[in-house]
Image (cartoon, grey):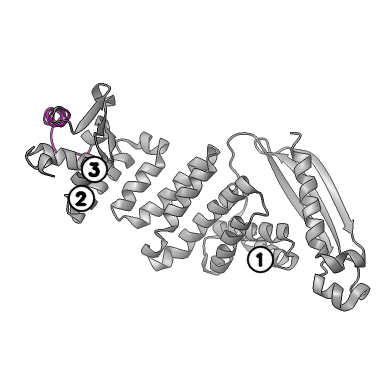
């Protein structure tokens, strides 16, 4: 700290730069510091000559980096918390206005400074934007990090908005796990269970449709037909009010190529393992009739259809929940139909 103290006004520039991060560029710093361009350049030259900063490039594209992380930390810690929040607010304002193209490319950068400025009700949607942007680029592990960053702020937002903020983030997180691990993964099931616990607090009709769609899909894949049917029945009214949902669950992105799979269950008879053991063949055979259509993600044109009509013997059901086995068989066949494309 002593090396910074003797630099006078240059210390202020170093502390604002530290709020941006260990590495920062001239353009963003110039948009935030309360001094003119000449004074700023002199201060930066002084920091470089003092051995506190490295410099690369020229003009507005010049990039600086604190020589040691400890120097950056000391400069940052030397600020009062209230002053830090003011600087982070100024950085966020610059990214949202003068440098909005950068925020479009790096939405997580804006989310970070909104968080550090304690502007929580703005930060949470921005973390969701960052997650959506990463998902569109097939960077789903990165997107999960942004989802977690948003979820960490949920308890600090206003109570009346808390449930919907959380559900929106959970939906994106579950979608990422589906892509990374598959529809039957436990991580996604945990997130959909949290959505289910919050769904009655959701008032936004589109979000309600999104949440119920995910709950239905998760229940269907896990073989819980009763829950899937209940979710389907709840979907009817909000689905009609919400109209055509283009960004269902944040689960489907329109960028790139892919296949949309629509599954329609015409009829089924669910027989649990317990019922088989208790009542044997008197419970009747389990069965499922379903129709699947395959649509191109971009053109929405149907390029294939397939029907499934399954039935099992009573003895099969004694040792395993039959509908679960049937569901997994259908899902495996659907994936096999998609893969050649």
Q: Nearer the viewer, mark 3 or mark 2?
A: 3
Q: Are marks 2 and 1 in contact (CB under 8 Å)?
A: no
From the top left corner, tell me how far across and down residue 128 is, in percent: 46, 50
Q: Secondary structure at mark 2?
A: helix
| Quadrant position of the N terminus in the picture | top left
From the viewer's perspective, is the residue at label 1 or at label 3 nearer?
3
In this rendering, position of residue 156 left or right of residue 272: left
Q: Residue at x 43, y 63 (%)?
A: 161
Q: Looking at this view, is 153 or 216 the one in front?
A: 153
Instruction: Identify the residue position indicated by label 2 in the image.
Output: 77
Can you say whether 337 is above or below 235 in the image?
above
Task: Name the residue beneath numbered marker 3.
Answer: 70
**Distance from label 3 to label 2 (Cα)?**
10 Å
How far apart are labels 1 and 3 at the CA level? 55 Å
The segment highlighted magenta reads: 32-48
Neighbourhood count class around disc 1 (C-alpha, 10 Å): few under 14, some 14–19, many 20 upward: some
Ranked by sequence position, the earlier of labels 1 and 3 is 3
Residue 43: x %, y % from top left? 13, 32
């Amino acid at each position: 700290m002593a090396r910074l103290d003797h630099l006078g006004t240059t210390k202020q520039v170093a502390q604002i730069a530290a709020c941006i991060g260990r590495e920062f560029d001239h353009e963003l710093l110039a948009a935030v510091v309360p001094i003119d361009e000449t004074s700023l350049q002199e201060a930066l030259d002084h920091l470089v000559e003092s051995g506190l900063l490295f410099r690369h490039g020229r003009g507005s594209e010049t990039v600086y980096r604190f020589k040691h992380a400890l120097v950056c930390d000391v400069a940052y810690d030397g600020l009062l918390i209230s002053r830090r929040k003011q600087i982070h607010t100024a950085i966020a304002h610059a990214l949202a206005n003068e440098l909005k193209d950068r925020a479009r490319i790096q939405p997580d950068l804006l989310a970070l400074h909104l968080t550090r400025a304690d502007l929580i009700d703005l930060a949470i949607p921005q973390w969701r934007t960052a997650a959506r942007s990463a998902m569109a680029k097939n960077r789903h592990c990165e997107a999960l990090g942004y989802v977690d960053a948003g979820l960490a702020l949920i308890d600090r937002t206003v109570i009346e908005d808390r449930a919907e903020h959380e559900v929106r983030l959970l939906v994106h997180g579950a979608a990422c796990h589906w892509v990374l691990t598959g529809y039957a993964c436990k991580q996604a099931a945990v997130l959909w269970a949290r959505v289910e616990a919050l769904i009655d607090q959701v008032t936004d009709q589109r979000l309600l449709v999104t949440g119920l769609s995910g709950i239905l899909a998760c229940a269907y894949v896990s073989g819980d037909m009763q829950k899937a049917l209940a979710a389907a029945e709840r979907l009817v009214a909000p689905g009609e009010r919400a109209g055509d949902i283009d960004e269902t669950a944040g689960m489907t992105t329109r960028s790139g190529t892919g296949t949309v799979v629509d599954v329609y269950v015409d009829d089924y008879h669910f027989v649990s393992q317990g019922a088989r053991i208790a009542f044997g063949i008197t419970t009747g055979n389990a069965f499922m009739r379903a129709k699947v259509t395959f649509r191109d993600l971009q053109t929405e044109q149907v390029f294939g259809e397939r029907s499934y009509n399954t039935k099992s013997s009573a003895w099969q059901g004694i040792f395993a929940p039959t509908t679960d086995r049937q569901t997994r068989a259908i899902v495996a066949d659907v994936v096999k139909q998609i893969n050649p494309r």
